[in-house]
Amino acid sequence: MTRVVHKFGGSSLSSASRYQAVAQIILGHCKSGDCVVVSAAGKTTNTLVKLWQSYQQQDQQAFSDVLIQLEKHQSELVDELFSGDVHRALKAQLDAELVAITQLAQQSELQESPLLAHGELWSARLLAHYLNELKVAARSIDARQLFTLHDAQLLHQQNKATCYAQLQDAVVYVVTGFIAQDCDKNTVTLGRNGSDYSATLLASYIDASAVSIWTDTQGVYSTDPRKVSNALKYPKVCRAQANLLARLGNPVLHAKTLSPLKGSNIKLQVRSSYEPEASPTEIVKEGYSKAKRFITTFENLDLVRVENLAKGEVRTLSQLIQHSIHHFIVNGEAYLLLPATFTHIVAQQLAGRINIVESNLQGCALVASSSELSGLKQQAEQLFHDREVVVRFAHQDSDYALFLTDQALDSDLLAVLHDKLINKGREIAVIIAGIGNVGDVFLQQCEQQITRLQSQFDLKVVGLLRSKEMVFSPSGIELSAWQTQWKNEAQSYNSKSLVEHISELDYEHKVVIDITASEAFSLLYPDFVASDCHLISANKYAGTADRGWYQSLREQQRERNLHWRYNTSVGAGLPINFALADLQNSGDVITSIEGVFSGTLSWLCSSFTADQKFSDLVLAAQEMGYTEPDPREDLSGRDMQRKLLILARDLGLELDVDDIALEPLMPVHLAEGSWDDFLAKRDELDTFYAVKYQQADDEGKSLRYTGQLIISDSGTVTAKVGIAFAEAGSAIANLTPGDNIFVIKSVWYEQNPLVIQGPGAGKEVTAAGIHSDLYWLTQQLK
Ligand SMILES: NC(=O)c1ccc[n+]([C@@H]2O[C@H](COP(=O)([O-])OP(=O)(O)OC[C@H]3O[C@@H](n4cnc5c(N)ncnc54)[C@H](O)[C@@H]3O)[C@@H](O)[C@H]2O)c1
Ligand SMILES: N[C@@H](CCO)C(=O)O
């Protein structure tokens, strides 16, 4: 049986609603036999430490205040999660424990480790009971029954045998993190934030296939995402770099977490308990991921030099202060970076062997591959110099550089460092879906465009997709020979395998370019976004999908800092979306958009003469690549209706497609059946069009197909697309065949509207418009 260990940290269990969310994750991701390791809820361990301190200081008032605080938090959890007998039993158990703590304190018999252990014991108990309430067979386990140490060393063989023997049943085991016991059954703690370590230890003891560390961030980022909004979440990080980050004090993974996985094939993932469906960061074995770049920051450190530092001494010190300590050698001398608050404890321990070199340091470490580190370090030095940041101590090792400064690195400076050092020359994986009319030309233009972008980005096309087959090559497809590769390697795929391939990609940025006309494909957008893909769409379906779906996609993108460009979905290459965004960003208010937004209908109406069959022209437009794959999408007005909806949503209007009135440019019943059925009845289209044409001509006007969106002063919106008889000599009557025209009125463009006009369909202009979106994206990522 393959088993998985899941670990939930304190932030994942800070309130009753978080317990409920965690229980849902367990329902969705755990099977019987899996283990769930838990930390103390929220800030419980800190509160227990405070309780211990007040006990030591014999401050009875503080002791009872802190105890009340603990009681309140735990009681609230029990009250909100349970009722009836279970509630009564859990409450009684909690009361008895709190009374016992008070009595031990009064008898001066309180001990630190057993006191701290309560945090994890409470979490495990509550979660197991809550799972039982949800009819999940779950049992809480005190990890002191599983993990034993002797002389501060874990007894691995014994522990493994114990875990195998004790974790045999068909239940989900909820195991306390952080705690273990010694051979005399005294409680031992595994270091602050030791629950990650408990999880990987347990995984190694039960030969689990994977460990998921569920936390409050979505994975391992290039720098602190709370400080730098465009921090990159890496899909994969190799164990050596994760270890180094932990040693440098980066909070996502803790120093000892990785050691139990050494030499094993156990998969380790860091994922968000707040967004369980978001793609995780996987910590992979050496050689399974490229080295990434990181900036990790420091606050309040002392730099000390230590004489005769013995092997294993750093680990002992780190255990003593329950904090990771970074350690390095310069000219044969050992240096430690200590959290300033603990320097006196370390100094006591090392009795006369330490010299404080610098105190109260801030700064950062830059982590990168050895081949690029020196260059990046030089750039960082220059940036610090330019910004007058005093670097009091710098050190470079093979895979990281330290800059210890006087002042803390504020978010601004960190953002600049990130942009210049991390976000530069980065890789983008491009997946292109839909190699038809437009897609084919897009690919032809790609080689040249990729070369142009090369100085800033290493852009690789990794996937080419048609409806049934794809070529997927994570290292990049040779574009000059893609047809040959297609012939030799194209494989059939389904949505699930496609999403899996994409989420596996080890790139800093990913973009899916949708040049299909497929609604089914657009329904995969939430999966692509969950795999951290930016999106570029020529396809109009997602932009015109049901409002609830559309808004939740937008929300998902906002949360992940992902971009979505869709300029070619309206007006092909014309910069209509840019213009609308620009006007609104400059404070203007748009009051109406009118015009012709279909290249096909523009070409058909402007080219038609009375001696022609309209359907012949339709076939010619199709041949030229103007029409939708099924030209009835154009003739029905549906395509133009979608475009108007996309524009309306760009103005912040909450409309759905059917809120836009539509009059078709063909008999309605011709929409039914196959394209061949339609061709068989093309005479009916010709008659329909000829009659309308004649009516317009009789009035001295020209038959056109137009759209109109008007927002009244009171905010009422009217929108429609349909047949219009344009005045002779008007801009719409004189439109060049194939051109679109957008007439935009706004507060500033009231009397004399802003007009955007030009080709509104065609393979070349559309493909170029998609390149423009891709270029725009790269500029945002710079
Ligand atoms: N033709 C234009 O002038 C123009 C202008 C602007 C926007 N667009 C939009 O561009 C898109 C493509 O237009 P086109 O004229 O190239 O169409 P097309 O029919 O020539 O090409 C579409 C391609 O998409 C592929 N495809 C279909 N379903 C797929 C799926 N589920 N997964 C992957 N691939 C799939 C097809 O195999 C085909 O290769 C449409 O959404 C269209 O509205 C076209
Ligand atoms: N069929 C569409 C293609 C561009 O979306 C048109 O003619 O406008």
Image (cartoon, helix red, strand yellow):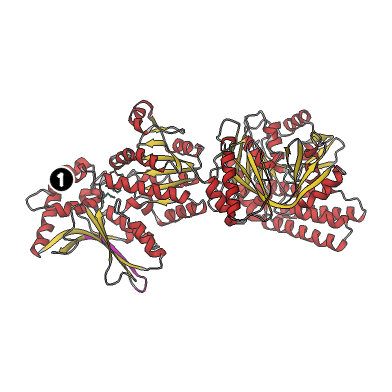
Query: Please, which residue is most extreme toward the top here?
Result: 488
Instruction: Name which quarter of the figure residue 471 lies in.
Output: top left
Report whether residue 225 is seen: no
Residue 752 appears at what percent x and percent y? 26, 70
CB of mark 1 near ligand 2 (< 8 Å): no
Instruction: Report which residue position mark 1 lands on.
Output: 681
Is 720 magenta? The answer is yes
Residue drawn at point x = 30 percent, y = 51 percent: 573
Task: Tell me which segment is drawn in magenta.
Answer: 713-722
Q: Is 53 a magenta residue?
A: no
Q: Can residue 366 be seen in this snapshot?
A: yes
Question: Splitting the image into 4 quarters, where does residue 622 fall?
Answer: top left
From the viewer's side, name the closer residue of 193 and 629.
193
Residue 246 lies left or right of residue 694; in this view the side is right
Image point 10% across, 65% down: which residue?
Answer: 699
Of residues 497 and 265, the one drawn nearer to the viewer in this rendering: 265
Total marks in image: 1
Is disc 1 placed on a helix, strand or loop?
Answer: loop
* Residue furthest right in the image: 107
Main SS of the magenta part reads strand
Residue 613 located left or right of residue 535? left
The type of residue carrying mark 1 is Lys
Q: Is residue 499 left or right of residue 14?
A: left
| Residue at (87% x, 44% y) in the render | 352
Q: Residues within 10 Å of mark 1 (few under 14, many from 20)?
A: few
**Is residue 92 placed above or below 144 in the rendered structure?**
below
Q: Nearer the viewer, residue 86 or 583?
A: 583
Residue 746: image quadrant is bottom left
Residue 485 image position (x, y, % from top left): 36, 28
